[in-house]
Image: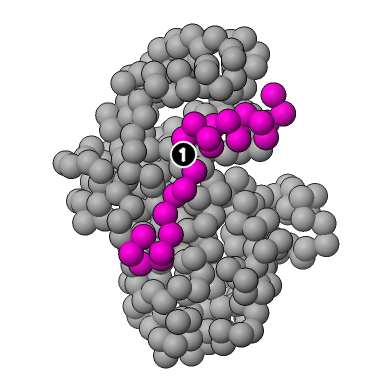
Amino acid sequence: MDSAALGLPGMAPPDSALTVAVTGASGFIGGALVARLWAQGADGRPVRVRPMASSPESVARVKSRFAGLPVTMLQGLDAEGLRSLFEGVHVFVHAGWSSVPSTAERDPLGDLRTNVEGSLRLFQAALLAGVRRIVFLSSGGTVYGEPRWSPITEDHPTEPVGVYGASKLCAERYLVALARTHGAESVVLRPANVYGRSMAHDKPQGVVENWMARLRQGADLECWNDPRMVRDYIHVDDLVDALVAALHRPVKETVLNVGTGHGTDLRQLAGLLERITGHTARLRTMDTVYPALSINVLDNAKLRQVLGTAPQIALEEGLARTWATLGA
């Protein structure tokens, strides 16, 4: 059954191409989604993908990765300019976000203006242009707060302890309210800790790739929180599977966790990396720089039920794949 069968006007017939706009196309997750759609479509269905980026630098990164694929820059457009970008789009995937938890804590007002207000403008433009489904990439790691039970289900109270989670939750609520008003579909995906980047880095997000870079350099692994902190690690390919399913599966309005349901603490992660890489993993505990939760593990039963998909890549396999991809 296709979304068109739900009776919403503007959705592409099942046998025609789906036009999908994607923000954050120069980033980690948005770029991975664009790559999948450009190469494979959506579960055998052809897709016309429209990548969008927020700045000239981001546009250049997308063009260098996807030669020949037209890219749209969002910077400097007014409401009508934004609306025109969504003409003919069936599904809008909002995967763009300019902050990480630590940077959001340092500048809450800037995070609000750039990310929440920016998301609201995009949601409004897409809906006014007739987009019938919006998929928003939220955060399963921050919107719930300290868990009352684990694994966390979607009916868990949302009590974020940091600015990043508060912003993501605020954008979620705006999307659901606006979509209802316009009679459109909204799908909110709350992913766990995503890894699987193709480049190691020293950025303040993505402990797996950061630690891999440090292992390759022979440096200590900087642990910015309690080494006993438990997280749910999901490979980016599994998240992209969920995003692709969210493009066309029959969903009216829903919020879905995208996690494995299994937790790993930082000491265990270091041990896995040591075994996979062959490098000695020495943990060095640092001062915490932003509010951190003791445990965050996401239940994925609703994801399986609604979208018919769930993470398949075991953590050790995914770590080994990531290490090989980094060219170690």
What is the crowding at mark 1: few (fewer than 14 residues within 10 Å), some, or many (at least 20)?
Answer: few
Which type of secondary structure does the marked residue at label 1 adopt? Answer: loop
Residue position for label 1: 314
**Up-down relation of residue 315 to residue 202 (above or below):** below
Instruction: Name the main secondary structure of what is drawn in magenta.
Output: helix
User: Which residue is rendered at x = 33% and y = 43% of the image?
Assistant: 261
Please indicate whether residue 311 sits to the left or right of residue 293 in the image: right
Task: Identify which residue, 151 or 49, lies in the foreground.
Answer: 151
Give the quarter of the image for residue 174. bottom left
Q: The N terminus appears in which quarter of the rendering? A: bottom left
Location of residue 71 in the rendering, given as x and y in whole percent from the top left corner: 73, 62
**Up-down relation of residue 157 to residue 45 (above or below):** above
Instruction: Please state the extent of the stretch shown in magenta in the rendering.
Output: 304-328
Three-letter amino acid code of the residue under disc 1: Ala
Please indicate whether residue 201 sits to the left or right of residue 190 in the image: right
User: Which residue is rendered at x = 47% and y = 22% of the image?
Assistant: 272
Location of residue 278 in the rendering, given as x and y in whole percent from the top left corner: 59, 15
